Structures are given as C-alpha cells and as structure tokens.
C-alpha cells in the first residue's frame, strides 16, 4: 500500500512540477537569447545619393531591398557627414572623431591605423571582426580578425583583392563578389560562438559607374526626369559654386563617363576637360575576355550609333550627358540593392536576422544633376546628407522615421553602446541608441562640417560651417574669404545666399556664435 501511495505521490508531483520546470526553462532560454550581444553588419556604399533610394525619394529608382530595411527598421531623415569625401568620411566612421582629430583630412592622407577605432575596441571586448570590400585608407587594416580589401578605388570587373597573404584577382562583378565573400565569412569562417561585426563595403556606385553584366539589357531602357536646377547659373551663390569643376555640362567626360569611343569624340571635334577622361576604358577593359568586351559593346552600340547620327551641342548635350550618367549610375545601384537582398535572405535562412543590427549607409551623398553637378564635397544638402537606415527589431519599431540631426561621428559610439561597451571619452559623437528606441531625449541643435581638399580634383574650395534644423552658414576660405547663409525652409534648394539680407542679420549673428562654439567644442582651431 505504501509503495502504491509513493508512486501516486511521485506521479502527482511530476504533473504539478514539470509544467513549471518547462515554463522556467523556456523563460531562461528566452532570457539568454535576449541577453545575447548583438551582431552588427554595416553595409557601406560609395557615393550613393539619398535621392537614389526609394525609401527617401521615388523619383529616380526603386530599391526594394534597401527599402525593406527601412520598413522593418528606422530611416534617418536628417543624416549628415562631417567631411563629404570618401577617405575622410570613412576615418570619421571608424574613430567617432572629426577629421582634424583623427588626422585624415583628405584623400591624400594615409590613415593612422595605430589609433583607436570601434572595431579594435569591439575586438578586445570579445567580438569577432571582419572587413570585406572597399577600404580606401591606404594603410593596412587593423582591428580585424579577417580582412579582404580592394586596392584603392578597386575595379568593377574581375577585381583584385588584398589580404594578409598578398594580392589575388577574383573573377566576376565586384558587388557580387563582395557579397559572396560576406556571406561565406558569416556561414563558414567566423567563430559561431562569438558575436560579430562585419563591415561590408561596396565600391559601387562610385565613378566610373559600370553596371553589372546581368543588367546590361536594361541600361539604356529608361529616360529619367531632370532636376529643376540642372541649368543652374549660380547667380545666387559665390565664387566657390561658380568655379567648382564638376558640372555635367563642362566637366563630365564623353568617353570615360558617357562611354563614347575616343575615335568618335575626336572625329566630331569634341574636347575632353581632362586628358585622362579621354579613354575607352582601357584600364577597366584589360581584364575582360573578348566575349565580355563584346557584351559591353553590344550594350552601348545603340547609344553610340545614335550619337554618331545626331551629335549634341549646348543644352541638348548637357541633357544627353545627364541621361547617360543616370542610366549607368542607377543601374549600378540596382546591383547593390539586389545583393543586399541576397545577404538579407542568408541571414533570414540562418536565423540571424533577429539578433543582428543591419546598417545601410553611404560614405557621403552625391549630386545627381542638382545645380548641374556630379560628385560631392560641398556642404550643400545633396552631398552633405547621406542615407542612414538601421534595422534591429529588438529595439527599433518597424517603419520608424527619425528627424534628429545625426552625423557620421555618431556611428562608432552607437555600435559600442549597443554592444554594452563603454564609449571612450575622446570620441566626439553621440550614441544613437536612445533614438533607435524611440526615446524623447535632448539632442544636438546643430551640426559642424569641415572640408579641406583644395586645390585638388573638382576644385571645390575649402570651407567649414554650421547647420541647424532650418539654417546653414558656410565660410569658404584659403584663397577666398566668403560667407554664405541659407534659409532651408524658404529656400530648400539653396539657390539664394542671404548673408547680407537685412532680415537675416540676427540669424547670421546667432549662427556665427554657434559656429564658434562648435569649433571650440570639437577643438578645431586650425
């Protein structure tokens, strides 16, 4: 009888306690999962204008895979850089410091790789770190457990890569290859017991805007709307805008950029702005097979024959060059978007989406015909702004849009903060974590900018300035001394400098004071 009672008691005890054990076990698993340190993937493109992402603007292109990150995360509507040129911007992202503090002020510098960077800090805190793609900082990468980088700007077709073991050439299209390498590292090479940071840095859509062979059939298939300011005469601006050498009309190449054969350009009597623009892509085509060269020639033959029959001049030529620019530039971006879809799908299939912060950003903005320009460098909106999208469902509400003034000095701090790592006091930005959580916090009221690379290509004069939510004050210096003030609410396209307008003198005084305060705060005494 005692034995039966004992068995009955045991059965009842199991029935009562097991569900509780199961529940507690499940809660512990859930808690452990939530406490996992997040993985971080930063996808950085080169010269990707926010106007060419349909999450920001649907005028020119549809980018469904980038848009999906915004739909499932947060889009920053007021994201800016501190120096709109490639190498300095990348140095700022790594260090969380303005150019004058990290020492990398222009594209002629060599990055001091001994200095503190967020990958180094995260590596020393138990993260596995990798860098794949464009580096463009000259020095050897440090702070990465694994790195494979393009030499300099890199090549679109069959590019070389540099590793710790030297150089080697890969077969294929650069955007596909970088994505292949990123997926392979995630799937096969990383230590799956550690959280990771992956910098997936694309060459595209940097000049010379060479589309993927997979997209050759669509390159010439569209006509794009012209920006309102395509024929800007800069009458409302100063010397810097008038003398910059990045006008589509005068400074975009017919051969290198528009892909007309040099012989045709010569026979029709056109002159290229710079001699090195006068190329048939020899430096790019040298690695291509006869079949691949034929595919490129077949792609552009209809355009070339049309131009041969109907040479353009004047405004008609500017319009033609703008269309050629958009056709190649935007088709190159299509490949970027397609490959972001591939990477996203790999993360989804391997249950990595929920615990991974995915960041999409460009190293700066770019002109897509606004003010008649291509390239970047100016503090005017199109190059000062950069797209910034972050997806991390644990803390970011889907379809969020943030309107605070954020800058690339904030990235390093954000990644460290998300990983639970103390942010060094000498970093100059702020963690975006409260903004990602949707918290109402006191945020900065102004941004500081400083561009140094003059005299140099595109002849954009040195300048620094301050931007608030409504106004922008710029000082062009070095070989000139000119100030410009813009009311972004009344003049969003920045067509009229109101520095001397009587009604803006109090605003000017306020901005001068705020600029001086920011220069002091950031230690820019040069």
Image: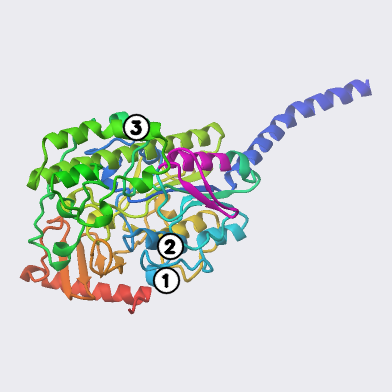
Find residue 216 and name its label. Answer: none
Label 3 to label 2: alpha-carbon separation: 40 Å
Label 3 to label 1: alpha-carbon separation: 45 Å
First along the sequence among labels 2 and 1: 2
Residue on which disc 1 sits:
103
Query: Quick one: which residue is furthest to the bottom in this view?
Result: 525
| Residue 311 point in image, percent of width and height | 11, 40
Using a 10 Å C-alpha cutoff, classify the residue at mark 1 as few (fewer than 14 neighbours), some (14 to 19) or many (20 or more).
some
* Residue at the image position 37 percent from the left and 33 percent from the top: 213
| Residue 22 point in image, percent of width and height | 69, 32
Mark 2–mark 1 contact, CB under 8 Å?
A: yes
Residue on which disc 3 sits:
294
- Secondary structure under the numbered disc 3 in the rendered image: helix
Q: Is residue 340 left or right of residue 218?
A: right
- Secondary structure under the numbered disc 2 in the rendered image: helix
Depth check, mark 3 against mark 1: the one in front is 3
Label 2 to label 1: alpha-carbon separation: 9 Å
Q: Which residues are magenta?
A: 157-185
Give the answer, above or below, for where 506 lies relative to 88.
Answer: below
Instruction: Classify the position of the C terminus by image quarter.
Output: bottom left
Q: Is residue 192 left or right of residue 261?
A: right
Find residue 91 and name its label. Answer: 2
The quadrant holding residue 86 is bottom left
The quadrant holding residue 58 is top left
* Residue at the image position 8 percent from the left and 57 percent from the top: 233
Give the answer, above or below, for where 416 lies relative to 304.
Answer: below
Question: Residue 179 in magenta?
Answer: yes
| Residue 254 point in image, percent of width and height | 21, 47
Of residue 92 and residue 440, the one placed in the foreground of this image is 92
First along the sequence among labels 3 and 1: 1
């Amino acid at each position: 009888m005692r034995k039966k009672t004992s068995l009955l008691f045991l059965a009842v005890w199991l029935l009562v306690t097991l569900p509780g054990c199961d529940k507690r076990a499940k809660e512990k698993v859930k808690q452990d999962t939530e406490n996992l340190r997040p993985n971080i993937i930063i996808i950085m493109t080169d010269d990707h204008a926010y106007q060419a992402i349909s999450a920001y603007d649907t005028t020119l292109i549809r980018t469904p895979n980038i848009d999906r990150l915004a739909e499932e995360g947060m889009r920053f509507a007021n994201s800016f850089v501190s120096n709109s040129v490639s190498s300095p911007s990348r140095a700022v992202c790594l260090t969380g410091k303005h150019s004058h503090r990290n020492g990398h002020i222009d594209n002629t510098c060599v990055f001091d790789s001994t200095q503190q960077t967020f990958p180094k800090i995260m590596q020393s805190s138990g993260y596995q770190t990798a860098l794949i793609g464009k580096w463009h900082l000259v020095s050897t990468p440090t702070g990465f457990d694994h790195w494979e980088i393009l030499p300099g700007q890199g090549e679109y077709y069959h590019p070389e890569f540099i590793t710790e073991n030297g150089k080697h050439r890969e077969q294929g299209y650069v955007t596909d290859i970088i994505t292949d390498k990123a997926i392979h590292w995630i799937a096969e090479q990383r230590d799956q017991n550690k959280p990771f940071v992956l910098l997936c840095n694309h060459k595209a859509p940097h000049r010379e805007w060479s589309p993927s062979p997979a997209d050759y059939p669509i390159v010439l298939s569209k006509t794009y709307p012209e920006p309102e300011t395509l024929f800007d005469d800069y009458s409302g601006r100063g010397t810097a805008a008038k003398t910059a050498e990045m006008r589509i009309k005068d400074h975009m190449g017919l051969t290198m950029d528009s892909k007309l054969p040099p012989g045709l350009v010569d026979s029709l009597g056109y002159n290229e702005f710079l001699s090195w623009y006068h190329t048939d892509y020899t430096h790019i085509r040298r690695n291509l097979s006869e079949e691949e060269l034929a595919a490129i020639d077949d792609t552009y033959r209809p355009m070339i024959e049309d131009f041969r029959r109907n040479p353009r001049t004047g405004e008609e030529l500017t319009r033609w060059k703008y269309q050629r620019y958009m056709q190649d530039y935007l088709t190159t971006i299509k490949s970027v978007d397609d490959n972001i879809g591939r990477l996203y799908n790999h993360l989804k299939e391997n249950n990595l989406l929920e615990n991974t912060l995915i960041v999409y950003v460009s190293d700066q903005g770019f002109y897509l015909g606004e003010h008649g320009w291509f390239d970047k460098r100016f503090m005017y909106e199109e190059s000062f702004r950069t797209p910034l999208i972050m997806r991390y469902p644990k803390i970011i509400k889907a379809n969020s849009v943030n309107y605070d003034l954020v800058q690339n000095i904030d990235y390093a701090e954000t990644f460290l903060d998300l990983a639970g790592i103390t942010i060094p006091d000498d970093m100059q930005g702020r963690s975006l974590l409260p903004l990602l959580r949707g918290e109402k916090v006191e945020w900065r009221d102004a941004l500081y900018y400083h561009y140094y690379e003059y005299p140099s290509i595109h002849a954009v004069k040195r300048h620094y300035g301050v931007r608030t939510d409504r106004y922008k004050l710029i000082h062009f210096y070095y070989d000139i001394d000119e100030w410009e003030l813009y009311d972004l609410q009344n003049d969003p396209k920045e067509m009229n400098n109101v520095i001397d307008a009587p009604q803006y003198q109090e605003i000017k005084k306020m901005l001068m004071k705020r600029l001086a305060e920011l220069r002091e705060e950031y230690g820019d005494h040069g």
